[in-house]
Image: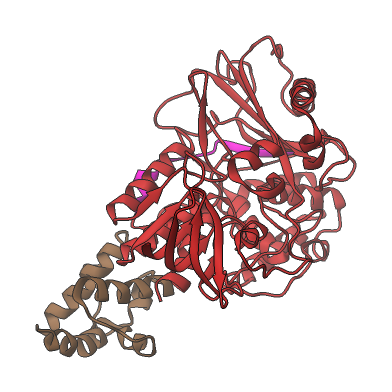
Chain colours: A red, B brown
Amino acid sequence: METYDVAIIGAGMSGIAAGIRSAHFGKKVCIFERHYAPGGLNSFYALDGRKYDVGLHAMTNFVKPGVKAAPLNRILRQLRIRREDLNLSEQKRSRIAFRGTDLKFSNDFGLLESEIDREFPDQVDGFRKLVEDVQGFDDSRIDYPYESARERVQARISNPLLEDMIFCPLMYYGSSTEEDMDFGQFVVMFKSIFLEGFARPFDGIRGIIKLLLKRYREVGGIRRMNTGIAKIEVVEGRAERLILDSGEEVKANIVLSSAGLPETDALCSEKWLGNSESEPGKLSFTETISTFGKSMKEFGWGEDAIVFFNGAKRFRYRSPESPVDLESGVICIPENFDYAEGEFSEGVVRVTCLANYRLWKSYPEDRYRNEKESWRPKIWEAAKSFMPETELAYPNECIAFDMFTPTTVERYSWRMRGAIYGSARKYRTGVTPISNLFLCGTDQGFLGIVGSMLSGIAMANAHALR
Amino acid sequence: MSKDECKQVVLDIIAEIAPDEELSDVKPDVALREQLDLDSMDFLDIVMELRKKHGIEVPESEYGELVSLDSCAAYLTPKFNALV
């Protein structure tokens, strides 16, 4: 039976990063991935000759080189990756667009502060205090007690509209809980989006995954694709053997799982997760990707890289009653980053909205297809009302279209309910009751592309290298 | 191995871990953390690279011996010279 020092479940960002760390320091490592493509929740695919990203709108956590203790710079060091190889281009600017009120922001934090000063002059002092709270929070501690972020923010911001506008991007880009989030998670997200910022490689997620896999190969890591783990055989509180989908068995001294908390528990021959924790995350999404024959700039759509929109009186971040929640969402226009490589010849607009997993899952195939068709123009209209009015005819001008739903995510990532931010409960130390089984990735609690890599690194350092 | 050679070994490791740091005038008697942007993850890597590249083991209770280049040299040189 093949025996590894470290077996990693899942070739996503966290799994590959953990693999690089472990292999670099001489461990015999194998990453097992059930899908044929690497990347996990940040993967890619091609359809009719066009390349698409899954997940990635923008990479958060962008800072300039040399910024002390910034997550991006820490992961580059830990993975021995040169910054120029990531080839990141900064966003032009982004926007939080609520009915009648706009707040622009960019990688220069001063812009958001001046926007708040303009729109909410009586709130700006409170906002500055909130920023001090964020900067004063020690997020290097792994185990901090739960605090309601809503309560902490309300102590500084008395205007509910501004409160919602601050929460909207942070929730959409990384909250696994409805309506409120842990203040520690709020701090991590606030820093990664507002105090740091957005960037993107010209060719999207592919370049980042390619770079990570190249490093992993260089340090001698082994990768087995189309090879899922069907079962973790637990004997006397230890993961004794891994049984692959093919029936083959392997052994590993340490198992790092990026499959998710309830998903990992479900793999184990002895269950260890309590009933209250075993519920998969509630938040899932649809995403539409519309491609046009010319750039969005030529349609007069301006310079927004990402637009977080909400048309409801209060912003609601929870699983909707209907298949898709049209009240709020995220618009991503990937051409609006300052690429050295040039400009996009085709315009691409991605729109992400909250979705109801249970409904999408219940539709038989025909109905599912029809539902997608019928939601497509509605989602477009919802998003368009927050963009400049132009002559853009939809869907006539659209030359390619794709849409995914919570069931698409579930089908390719094996993430229960397609909950991309994982379950509400996080295991921040990665430790499980199974002595040699540890979690990394989304349900360890670091989110986003940089966060996932940091999770893989931190968990490998703590559990695979000691 | 001389103490100066030992300091160079440590500097070479730091250069690999933190290629963006300026290492040409690191003061040997001043704590590395005061002069360079190194965090606990980076110090773990110094220890790991010493083991990987040179077969030198630094137990966790003795990480403090690596505080400056001088203390690194005092602590590590005998370890290097004890290798066959």
Q: Is residue A115 above or below residue A22?
A: above
Residue A96 in magenta stretch: yes
Q: Position of residue A326 (x, y in %)?
A: 82, 33
Residue A66 seen by the camera: no
Q: Where is residue A233 in the image (x, y as percent from the top left)?
A: 55, 65
Identity of the residue furthest to the front in this view: A247
Quadrant where the C terminus of chain A sits is bottom left
The foreground one among A16 and A169 is A16
Q: In this view, does B37 lie above or below A322?
A: below
With A246 as the anchor, is A191 left or right in this view? right
User: Where, by quadrant of the figure, is residue A153 drawn?
Assistant: bottom right
With A67 as the anchor, is A114 left or right in this view? right
Quadrant where the N terminus of chain A sits is bottom left
With A26 as the anchor, is A239 left or right in this view? right
Residue B34 in magenta stretch: no
Q: Which residue appears at 82% of the width and 34% of the height?
A: A323
Q: Where is residue A40 in the image (x, y as percent from the top left)?
A: 53, 46
Q: Is residue A111 above or below residue A435?
A: above
Circle count: 0
- Start and end of the magenta stretch? A81-99
The foreground one among A391 and B2 is B2
User: Where, by quadrant of the figure, is residue A221 drawn?
Assistant: bottom left
The foreground one among A255 and B22 is A255
Q: Position of residue A324 (x, y in %)?
A: 80, 34
Residue A150 seen by the camera: yes
Q: Which residue appears at 64% of the width and 61% of the height?
A: A261
Identity of the residue furthest to the right in this view: A313
